[in-house]
């Protein structure tokens, strides 16, 4: 499910707007976590994964209105599982050669 932000008003956004997509959710101890993949850049793209403890909200330029709990850029490719550590505010990325296109979010 993609995230989009639109406006019929003239907004001064950068020439290239990030692409964002919710790729996984996880409900742990009464909190709903969202894993967002953000692709940034014009030619050399950077892939950033972000973890939110509520549904992400974007402005008209696709910038976050809510600060993520954690985010980090990763090697693009077959990201199969991201394990988010709530205490340390960090995550571990697992890659899989026979990746089916789905990324799972684990919360510890």
Image (cartoon, rainbow, N blue to C red):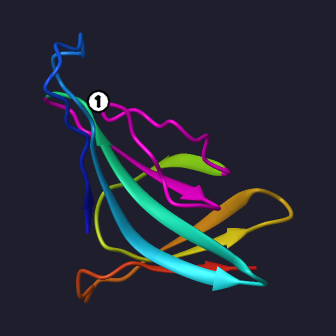
Q: Is residue 84 above or below residue 44?
A: below
Q: Can you say which quadrant of the picture contains the C terminus?
A: bottom right
Q: Which residue is rendered at x = 30% and y = 72% of the image?
A: 78
Q: Which residue is rendered at x = 60% and y = 70% of the image?
A: 33
Residue 9 shown in magenta: no
Q: Going by the picture, which residue comes out furthest to the front? A: 8
Q: Which residue is rendered at x = 21% and y = 32% of the image?
A: 44
Nearest the eye: 77 or 28: 28
Q: Is residue 5 above or below residue 102?
A: above
Point out residue 52 in the picture as x, y percentages from the top left corner. 59, 57
Q: Is residue 13 above or below residue 46?
A: above
Left or right of 30 in this view: 37: left
Q: Which residues are magenta?
A: 43-69
Point out residue 84 in the picture as x, y percentages from the top left corner. 66, 69
Q: Which residue is rendered at x = 64% and y = 50% of the image?
A: 70
Left or right of 22 in this view: 100: left
Q: Can you say which quadrant of the picture contains the N terminus?
A: bottom left
Point out residue 12 in the picture as x, y percentages from the top left corner. 24, 10
**Residue identifier under label 1:** 60
Q: Going by the picture, which residue comes out furthest to the right? A: 87
Q: Main secondary structure of the magenta part?
A: loop
Left or right of 107 in this view: 100: left
Nearest the eye: 24 or 84: 24
Q: Quadrant of residue 53?
A: bottom right
């Amino acid at each position: 499910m993609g995230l989009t932000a639109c406006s019929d008003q003239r907004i001064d956004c950068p020439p290239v707007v990030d692409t964002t997509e919710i790729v996984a959710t996880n409900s742990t101890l009464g909190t709903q976590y969202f894993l967002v993949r953000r692709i940034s850049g014009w030619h050399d793209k950077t892939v950033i994964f972000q973890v939110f403890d509520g549904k992400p909200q974007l402005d008209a330029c696709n910038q976050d209105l809510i600060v993520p709990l954690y985010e980090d850029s990763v090697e693009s490719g077959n990201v199969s599982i991201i394990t988010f550590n709530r205490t340390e505010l960090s995550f571990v990325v697992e890659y899989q050669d026979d990746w089916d296109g789905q990324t799972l979010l684990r919360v510890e």
